[in-house]
Amino acid sequence: MSFEAGQRVRILLADGHYIVRQGMRRILEAEPDFQVVGEAGDGEQAVRLARTLWPEVIVMEARLGKGDSAETTRRIKAQNPEAAILVLSAHDDEQYVVDMRKAGAGGCLLKSADGHQLVKAVRLIKEGMFVSDPLVEQRLVKRMSGRDRVEVNSAEHLTRREFQVLKLLSSRMTTRDIAHHLGLSQGTVKSHSVHLFSKMGVGSRTEAVLEAVKRGWVSLDDESVEEP
């Protein structure tokens, strides 16, 4: 299912507390391009509404009753792979972030975040970027530099298009901007990103860019998108 350009971003809220949902609704619907299309009080309801309402973004609490957030995320992504899921957690545990990313979440935000951070996170995951707390991200980078290694030894293992996408990711372009720059659909760009992440053995654009810079494949100051 697709939506015409210019329509508001369709958002589903999933939280066990009505007051929390109402607070998030007020924050998000204050944005002219956001529309909250439904609310779920538990995981089962979230899965059902994700199937019937077809939201583009789902904001979901970590401890959602009737099933954990990782399982709920996997079920939603199985039926609606294009949905971007933002999980709200009370704990800054990097292993939890890793587990949620593997389940298919587009980001994890601490419940202590303010309204501005929530709005920004929704916009970022809608564009295909992974979102997490900066301190958690730093710990993930340290972990990655230790035991987590990439599976490829040179940029030659990437296709020309995958390398172009990687270069543009390193220039901090959004998925939409990359699609426009390369004359591709956003879905195609996301597909190339998934493939190059898999080849590099990473789980997000942040990890991919950090690893590519470390290996000398890209420079954060280089705007060229030609293959090496």
Image (cartoon, grey):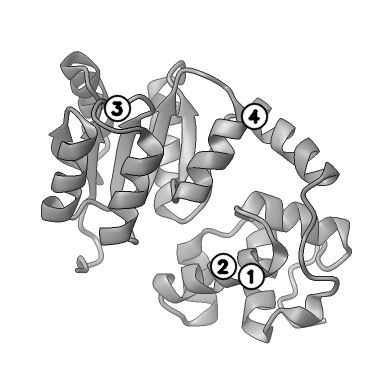
Residue 193: mark in rendering: 2
Cα–Cα gap, marks 1 and 4: 23 Å
Question: In the rendered image, which quarter is residue 145 located in?
Answer: top right
Q: Position of residue 103 (x, y in %)?
A: 45, 48
Query: Is residue 132 at all visible to an observer of this figure?
Result: no
Residue highlighted by disc 4: 136
> Which amino acid type corresponds to the residue marked 2 in the rendered image?
Ser
Cα–Cα gap, marks 4 and 2: 22 Å
Q: At 47% across and 56% down in the image, what residue appears?
A: 128
Question: In the rendered image, which quarter is residue 45 located in?
Answer: top left
Q: Secondary structure at mark 2?
A: helix
Indicate which label's residue lies in the foreground, 1 or 3. Answer: 3
> Which amino acid type corresponds to the residue marked 4 in the rendered image?
Val
Residue 196: mark in rendering: 1
* Disc 1 residue crowd, few under 14, some 14–19, many 20+, Cα 10 Å: many
Of labels 2 and 3, earlier in sequence is: 3
Cα–Cα gap, marks 2 and 3: 29 Å
Q: Secondary structure at mark 4?
A: helix
Location of residue 175 with respect to 135 vertically, above or below = below
Q: Position of residue 62 (x, y in %)?
A: 39, 28
Cα–Cα gap, marks 4 and 3: 22 Å
> Which amino acid type corresponds to the residue marked 1 in the rendered image?
Leu
Of labels 1 and 3, earlier in sequence is: 3
Q: At 66% across and 35% down in the image, what residue appears?
A: 137
Residue highlighted by disc 3: 64
Q: At 17% across and 33% down in the image, what residue appears?
A: 40
Cα–Cα gap, marks 1 and 2: 5 Å
Q: Secondary structure at mark 1?
A: helix
Of labels 4 and 3, earlier in sequence is: 3
* Disc 2 residue crowd, few under 14, some 14–19, many 20+, Cα 10 Å: many
Question: In the rendered image, which quarter is residue 224 located in?
Answer: bottom right
Of labels 1 and 4, earlier in sequence is: 4
